[in-house]
Image (cartoon, rainbow, N blue to C red):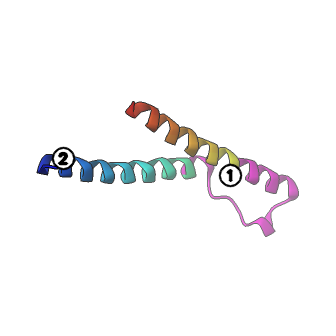
């Protein structure tokens, strides 16, 4: 492997980490951190649980979209 290939590989690794952090930060910002479970009513707990599931799905969709973009 030549120097150009090594530089490209390292650049891709760094870019991937930065992109993942940015996507995760955006999702966290959109869905918010929320309150502690002890301070919530049962309805709020259920809504928080659904929000976490939606955030997990959004991260997964972003990951799949990035993979599809590489092809």
Q: Is mark 2 on a helix, strand or loop?
A: helix
The residue wearing badge 2 is 5
Most distant residue in the right direction: 42
Q: Which residue is located at x 39 percent, y 30 percent?
A: 71
Q: Which residue is drawn at 18% across and 47% down?
A: 5
Residue closer to the observer: 9 or 33: 9
Q: Quadrant of residue 58?
A: top right
Q: Position of residue 3 (x, y in %)?
A: 12, 51
Q: Residue reaching furthest left?
A: 3
Q: Position of residue 13 (x, y in %)?
A: 32, 52
- In this rendering, is residue 54 above or below 43? above
- In this rendering, is residue 58 above or below 39? above
Q: For this view, does 1 lie left or right of residue 67?
A: left
Q: Residues within 10 Å of mark 2 (few under 14, many from 20)?
A: few
Q: Nearer the viewer, residue 19 or 40?
A: 19
* Residue with the mark numbered 1: 52
Q: Which residue is drawn at 37% across and 49% down?
A: 16
Q: Closer to the observer: label 2 or label 1?
A: 2
> Is residue 21 found inside the magenta-colored segment of the image?
no
**Which SS class for mark 1?**
helix
| Foreground residue among 68 and 20 | 68
Q: Residue at x 46, y 32 (%)?
A: 68
Which stretch appears magenta? 29-51
Magenta-colored segment: predominant secondary structure: helix
Q: Give x and y (percent) for residue 57.
A: 63, 43
Query: Seen from this angle, which residue lies furthest front?
Result: 1
């Amino acid at each position: 492997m030549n120097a150009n290939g090594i530089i490209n590989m390292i650049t891709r690794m760094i870019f991937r980490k930065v992109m993942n952090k940015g996507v995760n930060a955006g999702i966290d910002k959109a869905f918010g951190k929320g309150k502690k479970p002890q301070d919530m009513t049962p309805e709020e707990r259920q809504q928080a649980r659904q929000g976490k599931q939606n955030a997990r799905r959004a991260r997964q969709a972003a990951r799949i979209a990035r993979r599809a973009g590489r092809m």
